[in-house]
Image (spheres, grey):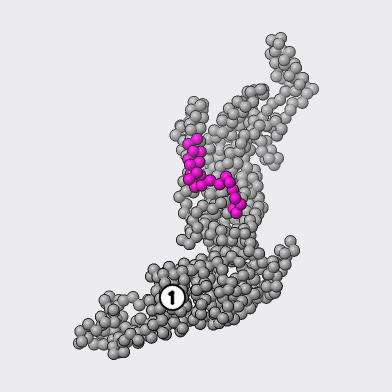
């Protein structure tokens, strides 16, 4: 309609003035011309040579046409009127099938990205001699019989970015039938996660110049020479490798400080580990839905708070501390639950946002050391469902630092002779002499055989989220250093009193715990035992300063750098 608007302008307007109106930003005749490269030129022709304008001239004038994001579902025969059309952009529409009979024979570049195409059968029915075909961000999963020299003899560039192609050998075989193919994009497909993906494509397609927007170097062709001969070793399997060498900056546990008074006949051990939550392919019958997990989390929170209130009422007189302080500390332990629920993952709209089954991978749980805790941990996960893995990589993985607390009580057992003597003394009304004989050795307390351990208590010291979306874009190695500031402050522990009550209830037949005052700490052999008598020592200001918890984390996709790597893996 804009062609006829120019005819209604006053006749006394000069041609130069009209051209100025067309190019001026504030002019009503300055309309959007991004839908074609020839649109602005045609407007100028309508001003300078209006006698040329007719339907045939207009349709033959256009060589490029862009109908992006126009809610198009089907291409009809009206497009054939553009007899000189060379580039047709139909990105971001709702096209599922397209008939080549409705495309002009002069067409050279066709863009169909971000549509609903899953099958290429209809497109391969006598298509025009294209040199570029863009099919990125669709749901194509099979191309075996669709790309041959009979259908695409002139095709130079093929864009299959982010589809559902999983069979690497089948896709490479199909692309090998294109005699002039020089540029290929397969990144974002599940097959790009396969071990040896890039090397196998380079070795199998010798005429290829650009792969995944990256020019193929000469050294790559040299390193992957003859890799296509080992195609039997190419499996549609991805291997994810994670590594945590060590962790540092964990503050000294309160139980190891001189100011801490250990309850009598009690052993407390604390160990530390790093946990990673990642995708699992195994079926788990115990997997709960998100609603059940949220309900369980709320129930655990309510139970812990009620348990805390009960213990606080029993100990508030002795401790002379404010109950509100305890309540705030208990609520802080569950503050991370809200952060996890409110955490938003970076997902594409085309990926599945439903919950996926996960597995928790954990390093060895080791005791505290002053400098750093060395794990040298490495874990490998193999995945056969490449499509599931590709969709999971759009989510952020969760990495936690866990403190595990073990509470145990020493069980003091009497020898048979002592039991017989004590029974006789009780019958005669004598008091039991607790002093040991000089000729007998006392049994050492703290032996593992004589300690009753309670279930471990796990506490999350820090949580981190790592975005690994770059794996889908071709970056197969992510290394980062996590850092989190932890304040080394006193934390009230109610687990000891609760554990005593459970122990006495379950072991009524055992001898009651000794009332002798004893302060001890059982740690690993390197840490030794720590005993404290007299008044507790005051903590120095340096002990109260916050420390930075730091550790390195690496996650990578197993890949080959040469043909020799393929041979080595095959031999293993």
Q: Is residue 330 above or below residue 38?
A: above
293 within the magenta span:
yes
Asked where in the image residue 68 lies, by quadrant, the reply is: bottom left
| Residue that label 1 marks | 89
The picture places residue 232, in percent across and down from the top left corner, at 69, 68
Q: Residue at x 78, y 23 (%)?
A: 440
Q: Identify the magenta region.
A: 280-303
| Residue 130 visible to an observer of this rendering | no
- In the shown orientation, is residue 428 left or right of residue 287? right
Residue 524, horizontal then vertical, whole percent:
68, 40
Residue 9 vertical placement versus 288 (above, below): below
Q: Is residue 444 visible?
A: yes
Q: Position of residue 94 (x, y in %)?
A: 43, 68
Q: Is residue 135 above or below residue 268?
A: below
Mark 1 neighbour class, 10 Å CA radius: few under 14, some 14 to 19, many 20 or more:
some
**Tally of marks:** 1
- Membership of 473 in magenta stretch: no
Quadrant where the N terminus is found in the figure:
bottom left
Residue beneath the point at 73% across and 13% down: 424
Q: Residue at x 57, y 64 (%)?
A: 190
Q: Helix, strand or loop at disc 1?
A: strand
């Amino acid at each position: 309609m804009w062609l006829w608007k120019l005819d209604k302008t006053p006749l006394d307007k000069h041609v130069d003035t009209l051209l100025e109106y067309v190019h001026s930003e504030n002019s009503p005749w300055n309309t959007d011309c991004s839908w074609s490269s020839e649109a602005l030129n045609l407007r100028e022709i309508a001003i300078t040579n209006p006698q040329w304008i007719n339907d045939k001239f207009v349709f033959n004038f256009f060589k490029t046409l862009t109908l992006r994001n126009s809610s198009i579902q089907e291409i009809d025969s009206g497009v054939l009127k553009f007899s000189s059309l060379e580039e047709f952009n139909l990105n971001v529409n709702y096209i599922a099938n397209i008939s080549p009979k409705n495309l002009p024979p002069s067409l050279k570049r066709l863009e169909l990205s971000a549509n609903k195409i899953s099958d290429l059968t209809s497109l391969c029915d006598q298509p025009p001699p294209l040199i570029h075909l863009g099919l990125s961000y669709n749901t194509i999963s099979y191309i075996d019989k669709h790309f041959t020299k009979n259908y695409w003899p002139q095709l130079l560039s093929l864009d299959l970015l982010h589809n559902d192609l999983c069979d690497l050998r089948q896709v490479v075989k199909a692309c090998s039938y294109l005699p002039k193919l020089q540029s290929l994009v397969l990144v974002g497909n599940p097959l790009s996660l396969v071990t040896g993906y890039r090397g196998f494509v380079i070795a199998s397609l010798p005429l290829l110049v650009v792969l995944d927007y990256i020019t193929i170097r000469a050294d790559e062709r040299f390193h992957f020479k003859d890799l296509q001969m080992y195609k039997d070793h190419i499996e549609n399997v991805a291997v994810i490798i994670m590594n945590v060498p060590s962790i540092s900056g964990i503050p000294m546990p309160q139980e190891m400080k001189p100011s801490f008074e250990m309850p009598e006949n009690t052993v407390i051990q604390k160990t530390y580990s790093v946990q990673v939550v990642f995708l699992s392919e195994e079926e788990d019958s115990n997997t709960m839905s998100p609603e059940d997990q949220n309900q369980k989390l709320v129930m655990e929170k309510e139970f812990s708070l009620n348990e805390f209130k009960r213990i606080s009422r029993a100990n508030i007189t002795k401790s002379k501390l404010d109950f509100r302080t305890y309540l705030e500390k208990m609520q802080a332990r569950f503050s991370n639950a809200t952060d996890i629920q409110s955490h938003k993952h970076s997902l594409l709209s085309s990926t599945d946002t439903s919950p996926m089954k996960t597995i928790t991978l954990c390093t060895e749980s080791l005791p505290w050391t002053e400098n750093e805790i060395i794990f040298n941990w490495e874990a490998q996960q193999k995945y056969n469902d490449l499509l599931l893995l590709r969709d999971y990589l759009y989510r952020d993985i969760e990495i936690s630092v866990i403190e595990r607390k073990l509470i145990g009580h020493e069980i003091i057992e009497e020898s048979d002779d002592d039991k017989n003597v004590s029974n006789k003394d009780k019958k005669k009304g004598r008091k039991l002499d607790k002093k040991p004989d000089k000729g007998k050795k006392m049994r050492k307390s703290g032996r593992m055989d004589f300690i009753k351990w309670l279930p471990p208590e796990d506490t999350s010291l820090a949580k981190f989220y790592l975005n690994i979306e770059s794996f889908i874009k071709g970056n197969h190695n992510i290394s980062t250093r996590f850092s989190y500031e932890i304040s080394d402050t006193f934390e009230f522990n109610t687990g000891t009193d609760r554990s005593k009550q459970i122990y006495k209830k379950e072991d009524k037949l055992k001898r009651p715990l000794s009332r002798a005052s004893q302060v001890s700490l059982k740690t690993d052999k390197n840490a030794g035992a720590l005993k404290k008598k007299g008044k507790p020592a005051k903590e120095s200001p340096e002990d109260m300063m916050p420390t930075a918890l730091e550790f390195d984390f690496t996650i990578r996709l197993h890949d080959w750098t040469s043909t020799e790597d393929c041979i080595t893996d095959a031999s293993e």
